[in-house]
Image (cartoon, helix red, strand yellow):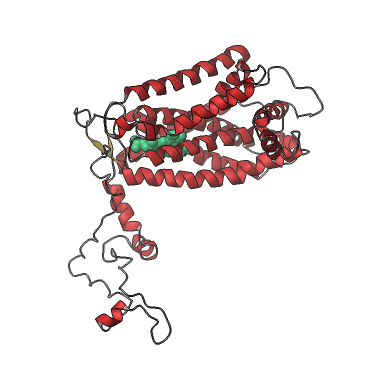
Amino acid sequence: MAENNQNAGAGNIPAKPKPAAPGAAKPAAPVAAKPATPKAAAKPAASQSGVYKPPVDRPDSNPYKDSRISPLGTWFQERFHVVIPVIDYLKKKEVPKHRLSFWYYFGGLALFFFILQVLTGLLLLQYYKPTEADAYASFVFIQKEVSFGWLIRQIHVWSANLMILTVFIHMFSTFFMKSYRKPRELMWLTGSVLFVLSLGFGFTGYLLPWNEIAFFATQVGTEVPKVAPGGTFIVNLLRGGEEVSGETLTRMFSIHVVLLPGLLMLLLSAHLLLVQVFGTSAPIGYKESGLIKGYDKFFPTFLAKDAIGWLIGLALIIYLAIILPGPIGIKANPLTPAPLGIKPEWYFWAQFVVLKDFSFEGGELLAIALITIGALFWLIIPFLDHRASREEKSPVFTIIGLLYLAALLINTYRVYAVYGW
Ligand code: HEM
């Protein structure tokens, strides 16, 4: 059994309705009429009027109707039937306190950066024009002419970087705390898809300013699948033709503003729903060894601490947006040769340098195969780490995690050492 907090069991939705307040009216009788005889009950059939009647009474879908809440709460409860169970749940939800609790804030921080991305992205969309002829000019216009356009654009750029950094931290911290262990495997799987989607945002967004660096980096990036079997099809699909062109811009734009946000919100809903169902886990053995120093109520204590983290994140983004604004560069010209030292965004550096290391005959395919196998192995770790599922320490998987982390950091640094930022 995983180490849940006391309330994490069955999703914390109360199984029984609260007793009615003294003097309150009794719950109304169920709407469906009872069958007259047992024989009639056994045979679901159309009533005389031809309307289908269920064989048994349906359970009352609003068993909380007699609870005392504000008129507004009652209004919503009558329409959605979930307000009271959700309030009950939030009142009971708790987060364990221990020396590693700090790492619990990174999931919420990633969520905050994503929300910022949606808000600033919507504002940028009011002026951005996703065509080969106008994209670059519209970016310059946003940056130089639109009131606070520069700030919105820079927040979007920095929040994107911090979101991906936070997702990396969140992934590794949940890994080392073995939060993926039974029954949380699906949190790991949905999280992994969220990770890929976050990288997808970075990749597709990079081309949108249609500047020289973005153009050539996209050319290099979209070329990668070519060496794999069926890769030419993927390259053409991504580019909308054989070369990077205005068609590629249209594809990247639609993926960036429609497909990825839709998928991410879907997966995020599943991820967060699972967090509510299972509650927050504690590291293996912490409960038994007395290392849990109590529990924070999620509402309002943990949420308030989360909010402090969000405010610090926002302050950091505004600071970075002002002192280190992302450049606009010069407009892409497909007819000019690629400038020297083209490299992707920092979050692809580790894979980029592996591809460079393997740039011998047949090496790129080998590198793609190795990276894919490494990623798939990482994905299925919850199903391999049986010791953690039994609430036993699993040092082998801790070492595997450390090796992944070291490879990521060393390879990222190698690109920095050669190319700089
Ligand atoms: C857009 C990206 C993501 C967002 C917004 C997000 C959000 C969250 C939030 C708010 C929580 C609850 C608080 C916490 O424990 O931090 C959480 C928990 C969790 N996340 Fe994520 N997450 C994301 C990506 C990932 C990734 C990439 C992984 C791993 C591959 C992952 C694995 C988990 C796990 C295992 C938990 C459960 C932690 C526990 O029970 O203690 N998440 N996530």
Closer to the camera in the image, 144 or 121: 121
User: In the displayed image of the protein, which residue is found farthest to the bottom?
Assistant: 48
User: In the displayed image of the protein, which residue is found farthest to the right?
Assistant: 335
Name the quarter showing ligand 1: top left
- Indicate the quadrant where residue 61 lies: bottom left
Q: Position of residue 400 (x, y in %)?
A: 40, 22
Q: Position of residue 186 (x, y in %)?
A: 40, 41
Whether 352 is drawn above or below 264: the answer is above
- Please count the marks in the image: 0
Q: Residue at left 54%, top 26%?
A: 371
Asked if residue 184 shows in the view, the reply is: yes
- Name the image quarter holding the N terminus: top left
Closer to the camera in the image, 235 or 64: 235
Asked if residue 34 shows in the view, the reply is: no
Whether 48 is drawn above or below 58: the answer is below
Q: Position of residue 206 (x, y in %)?
A: 64, 32
- Name the image quarter holding the C terminus: top right
Q: Where is residue 396 in the image (x, y as percent from the top left)?
A: 35, 22
Q: Residue at left 31%, top 56%?
A: 85
